[in-house]
Amino acid sequence: MKDINIMSITDLSKDLAPIISNTMADVVETKLREYLKKKSFKPGDALPKELELAEALGVSRNVLREALSRLRMLGMIETKKKRGMILARPDILGTFERVLDPLIIDNSTLQDIFELRLVLEMGLAELLYIRKTDKDIKELENIAKKEINNDNSFRIKNEIAFHGKLYEMSGNDTLKRFQIMLLPIFDYVVTLEQKPTRGSVSHLDLVEILKTGTVEDFKKGMQAHLQPHFDRLK
Amino acid sequence: MKDINIMSITDLSKDLAPIISNTMADVVETKLREYLKKKSFKPGDALPKELELAEALGVSRNVLREALSRLRMLGMIETKKKRGMILARPDILGTFERVLDPLIIDNSTLQDIFELRLVLEMGLAELLYIRKTDKDIKELENIAKKEINNDNSFRIKNEIAFHGKLYEMSGNDTLKRFQIMLLPIFDYVVTLEQKPTRGSVSHLDLVEILKTGTVEDFKKGMQAHLQPHFDRLK
DNA sequence: TTAGTCTTTATGTAGGACATATCAAATGTG
DNA sequence: CACATTTGATATGTCCTACATAAAGACTAA
């Protein structure tokens, strides 16, 4: 009897909506977003003042400010003392970092992000071959050489340095920053391994391929390098 | 004299920090983050009540609530009427969407994100071959077949449907949602083209490869399919 | 034990008050 | 008239108080 009750409740919670107790600040936040989009403000444009907005929305200045505070955090608006508020351009990744920071991510998402990183590394080849320079390759080689006579404690650091340099060589700033954000995750998953899982292709091998090989060669090399990680996927 | 003065000021403004007018809410937000991290709360743990926090931080409840409102938006904490606040697990991507939404992104970042998408698609192959099912392939084929006799207005929609399905087949939820977020960007860049840039490998070709070809075949196919986009990179 | 009621309490919301920084106009000076 | 200075107006930042509301926990009754 009891068990049945519990079951039905569990089922319910799956089916029914999670009962979002919309607080006023939530509603106002949404309305403000819509307002900004609808009016198609350009960065730098001035916004109405707090009291006007609060009155128009029919909420206290307090609630309005909570909503504004959120948008301000995201970099969507900026405020100055007398001048009022202006629309700004948010730093996409900067805000992303804020959430990733405390690392309170459930395991399934963690795994997803780790895979995301693998996907990125595998797909990097084209960009790399379009933009690589001799200087870059030399730097990459230096990084790879350093790690030869190193104890295990430095292994991860070198791993990070090498792959980080690869992202940098892609010439894509967003990608590079994105990768930096994902580092802790990569780190975490790697440390889950008991012993270092080395692919059949080393970092130095990859550098060599970059020097003389084709894009196809590099893709195969990277695949072999990451193979141990792929092997653990199911 | 005057010019010199102006010059030196300009130089200063480049060198010096941008004078972050730290509002109390900003400081409190940071302090709360540190507090949460330091105490290493686990999801579900109860937090002190607002008044206690406000007093401990030496700020008004108002300021504290602005900071809390931010964390609440990011999904880092949840609050219930009497129970107080509890630590929650943030929805990584959900917050990302919020910033991406208004599409006030500068062109260089736009380009970066477009490239990011290309990288993702190129790197998807391994995951795809690990997890693809016959059912998936059949659905993908249906999507590809639909687009044969279609006017241009549906072209983008089909493009989106096909590639979206690919992400779905990766079995990576985060990746899938990430791709959805990036759609508007992809859309935007694609519409910049005057005429459709078709690669030498069509969607149907890709499906065929998925059926009978190897991972390597698929990678080459995808590369050819996206070649027009890569050609535009510099 | 179970069901129902009451009390307590932490959050949600409102409104007023004042400090502060800054823009803009008024004022003074050569 | 042009330029520097002062003054006033104003929007945001911060604080405070008060009350509504929902929900946990205690208490009571069947």
Image (spheres, coloured by chain):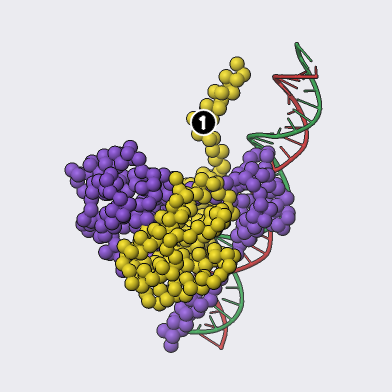
Chain colours: A purple, B yellow, C green, D red
Q: Quadrant of the N terminus of chain A?
A: bottom left
For this rendering, which residue is in front, D5 or B229? B229
Q: Between residue B161 and residue C1, name the one nearer to us.
A: B161
**Image position, residue B233 (x, y; %):** 45, 48
Q: Position of residue A173 (x, y in %)?
A: 44, 45
Outermost residue, front side = B200
- For the residue carrying disc 1, how many other residues have a C-alpha within 10 Å: few (<14), some (14-19), or many (20+)? few
Locate the C terminus of chain A by quadrant.
bottom left
Does C6 sit above or below residue B153? below
Q: Which residue is mark 1?
A: B14
- Does residue A190 appear in the picture of this structure? no
Q: Would you place residue B96 above or below residue D1 in this image?
A: below
Q: Quadrant of residue D10?
A: top right
Badge 1 marks a residue whose secondary structure is helix
Q: Is residue B227 above or below residue C5?
A: above
**Residue positioned 37% across, 58% down in the render:** B123
| Residue closer to the observer: A207 or B197 | B197
Q: Using the rendered view, name the quadrant where residue C14 is placed.
A: bottom right
Instruction: State the residue at coordinates (39%, 58%).
Output: B223
**In screen coordinates, is C5 left or right of B75?**
right
Residue furthest to the left in view is A149
Q: Position of residue A117 (x, y in %)?
A: 37, 56
Q: Chain of mark 1?
A: B
